[in-house]
Amino acid sequence: MCDDAIASYLKVNNAKAAVDTCVQLNKWYRAVELAKKHSLPGIEQLLSRYATHLLEHDNIIDAVQLYREANMFSEAASLLYELGGKAVSDQKDYLRAKKLYIMAGMMMEDYRKTRNAAAQEHREGSTKMYLDEEYQSPETARMLDSTWRGAVAIHFFLTAQHNIYEGDIAAALRMALIASEYDDVLPEKDLFLLVALSAAMAQCDRHTSRAFTHLVDLVNVESELKEKLQDLAVDIFVEKSNRRGGAAAAARQNKMEFEEVHCEECGEPTEDWVTQCPAC
Ligand SMILES: [Zn+2]
C-alpha cells in the first residue's frame, strides 16, 4: 500500500505528500531516502524523528547507523558511549564496552573533522555553520571527551586479567593499579577487587591491605562481600605474620616491592607505576 501511495504522489510531483505518507506508516527509512532524493527541506528534523522512533523501540544500533549516515557524528558517539556504559554496569561485558567506547571515540574524531570543515567554510562566508558550539550542552561535550578515556581504562583492566591468566602476577598488579586510577569511568568495586586479587597473589602487603580497606569503605559493596573481605584479610595477614616467625626469608622472597621514583616537577617520591603525580 505504501509503495502504491508513494508512486501515485510522485507521479503528480508531490514528493512531500509521499514523505508524509511514509512517516504516517512508520516507513522512516523510505521517508528519509525520498526526502534526500527530492532535496526536501527539514531533513534534519525528519532524521531526528526517525532516530527517536528507533530509540523508543530499543533499536539503538540502527539509530547509531542512521546518525552516522546523516553525518550526525556527535549523536552517534553519544549513543555508543551510553551503550558502553550499560555494557559495563548491566552486563559486565568489558570487551564489548571497550569496542563501543572506541567506536564512540572514532565518531567524535569524525565530528571534530566535520566541525572544523564547517568552521572553515563559515570563515570563507559561503554557507552558515551547521555545527556550532551551542550545538551541545557542556555535559554532553564532557561526556563525549571521556570516550577514549573509557577505552584506555578498560584496556588496562583487561590486560591485568590477561596477565593473571598468563601467570605474570607482577605485570598484573602494575596494570590493575594503573586501571584503578580510572575510577571516574569504571566501577571502583571491580577495579579494586582486581587490585586486591593481584596484590594478594603478588604478596604485596601494602597494596593488598589498601585495596581491602578501600573496598570495605565503599558504599556500594554488599555487606556480605565486606564480611568475606574482612575474613579473607585476617586469613592472609595472620598467616603471613605466622609464616614470618618461622620462615622470614622465604616470605621476603615472595614479596613484591615497587621502585621509588621522584616526580620531575615537584620531587615528591612515588611508586614507579604511578602515571600522574598525586602531589602535582
Ligand atoms: Zn609532582
Image (cartoon, rainbow, N blue to C red):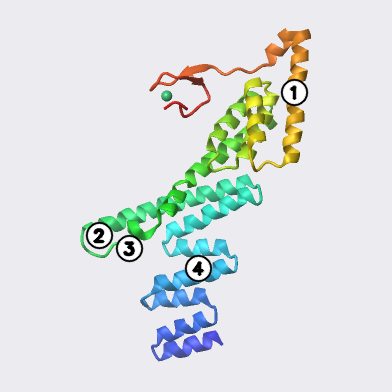
- C-alpha gap between disc 4 and disc 1: 54 Å
Q: In which quarter of the image is residue 195?
A: top right
SS at circle 3: loop
How crowded pointer 4 is (Cα within 10 Å; few <14, some 14-19, many 20+) is rated as: many
How crowded pointer 3 is (Cα within 10 Å; few <14, some 14-19, many 20+) is rated as: few
Mark 2 = which residue? 122
| Quarter of the image where the N terminus is located | bottom right
Q: Is residue 68 left or right of residue 175?
A: left
Q: Can residue 168 be seen in this view?
A: no
Residue at 44% over, 73% down? 46
Q: Mark 1 or 3, which is nearer the eye?
A: 1
Residue at 73% over, 9% down? 248
SS at circle 2: helix
Mark 3 = which residue? 130
- C-alpha gap between disc 2 and disc 1: 65 Å
Between disc 2 and disc 1, whose residue precedes?
2
Image position, residue 172 (x, y; %): 63, 29
- Amino acid found under the numbered disc labelled 4: Ala
> Badges 2 and 1: C-beta atoms under 8 Å apart?
no
- C-alpha gap between disc 2 and disc 3: 9 Å
Mark 1 = which residue? 236
Q: Please state which of residues 222 and 131 is positioned toward the viewer in this rendering.
A: 222
Between disc 1 and disc 3, whose residue precedes?
3
Image height check: is 136 above or below 43?
Answer: above
Image height check: is 178 above or below 102?
Answer: above
Between disc 4 and disc 1, whose residue precedes?
4
Mark 4 = which residue? 51
Q: Please state which of residues 62 and 214 is positioned toward the viewer in this rendering.
A: 214
SS at circle 4: helix
> Badges 2 and 4: C-beta atoms under 8 Å apart?
no
